[in-house]
Image: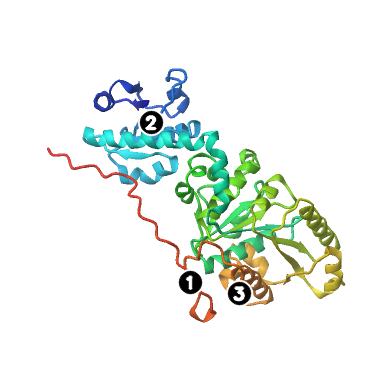
Amino acid sequence: MSIILVTSSAELHDKFSIVVGDSLLALTAKPVPADPAVVLGQLPADTALDVAIVDCTEPDSVGVQLARGLRQHCPTLSVVLVSSQGPELALAALRAGAHDIVDPQEDPSELGRVLDEAAEAARNRRADAAPANAAAIEEAAPSAASGRVISVVSPKGGVGKTTVATNLAVGLARVAPRATVLVDLDIQFGDVASGLNLDPEYHLPSVVHGPASRDSMVLKTFLTLHETGLYVVCAPESPAAADNVTAADVGRLLRTLAAEFSYVVVDTAPGLSEHTLAAMDESSDLVLLTSMDVPGLRGLRKELDAISALGMHSNRAIVLNFCTARVGLSTSDMEATIGTTIDVKLPRSKAAPASVNLGVPLLQSGTRDAMTKQLRKLVDSFVTTTAPDLAPAKPPKPDSGKKSRPLPRRAASGWFRRPRAVSS
């Protein structure tokens, strides 16, 4: 096993030298560098590094930052942090992709055990990443239990797509709290965070890159929790930050979320961008939205034709927004234009603009009007049809006549190790 120790402490160097022996590579630097290139540049050519031990005992240590950089450069690497403040450092270390935290006063036998486990984890990741296993993993994926992926799409902007997506997600979260997630896939100008009055710590690029992209447990710590029990992946903070998000990233993210959540709602950008197509490829259901005007209806017809040409056979719900009797179009006229029936018609609502400006969806505030009633109808169309493999975390009310199965309990991981007491 190949292990590198990054520390400024001669005492730590001596201690790990006893534990590891001749296979220990040491980078003694004061202070510990934050740049992973400094560490990786010290390795002999063609070295298959298993474990990096990073000293986090210094005040204002950049060890967590270094751990994150090392994992990004070497996805199979295991990083072990050395710190006497394990509980305080645990969440940051988890998000950085660290394997474990050990106390600097831990006895050598325990240190050896931790390093052995870390090295074994690194070897397993290398084996999983091997091309020989890629086909088996791909074949196993469809049989895995997964939730429903519902993409809200429209050919044009300004038709209330984000309003529909946020209300749909909030409505489903009432059925499946903490088992529903909303993804803002309008990667340049998405405003789901504004529509839900959220101030997210992490955004889409952080979710699809780094440790969160490789570990579903880490991924959940990067999601933003809304007060309704809905989890949210918010769009990048700026159009420039969206450049690093690829269609492959989108597909991988949605597959991971579908394996962990009962419902995954996706708010897409207008049109059929590569990111939207990637989302549609992973979707079990499509909500196709347009406004009550001839250009919007014709745009929807073109989108439906394109979806059919691409062979996408997801369940579809046609939703018409801003409905009013004053535009001179009958339901039969509109259905003839788009070539299919309309499932839900959302009337104009005086409460909707205030709902958007306040960041409180109509189905969250409980506003009683015709639009809210139709939004509930849309939510019910997904709840009352074939249930997802992952059951809602909370059963519906007794008088609803529906039955649900509670989510299986997951064992606590006991992720960080408490130091043993050191006798004086």
Can you identify the residue that label 1 sits on? 395
Q: Earlier in the sequence, mark 3 or mark 1?
A: 3
Q: Name the residue type under label 2.
A: Val
SS at circle 3: loop
Residue 249 percent across, percent down from the top left: 60, 43
Q: Is residue 265 left or right of residue 424?
A: right
Q: Is residue 63 left or right of residue 21?
A: right
Q: Nearer the viewer, mark 3 or mark 1?
A: 1
Can you identify the residue that label 3 sits on? 367
Dot 3 and dot 1 residues touching (CB under 8 Å): no
> Quick check: 251 above or below 327?
above
Q: Name the residue type under label 1.
A: Pro
Residue 87 percent across, percent down from the top left: 31, 46
Residue 371, numbered label = none
Residue 298 can be seen, yes or no: yes
Residue 82 can be seen, yes or no: no
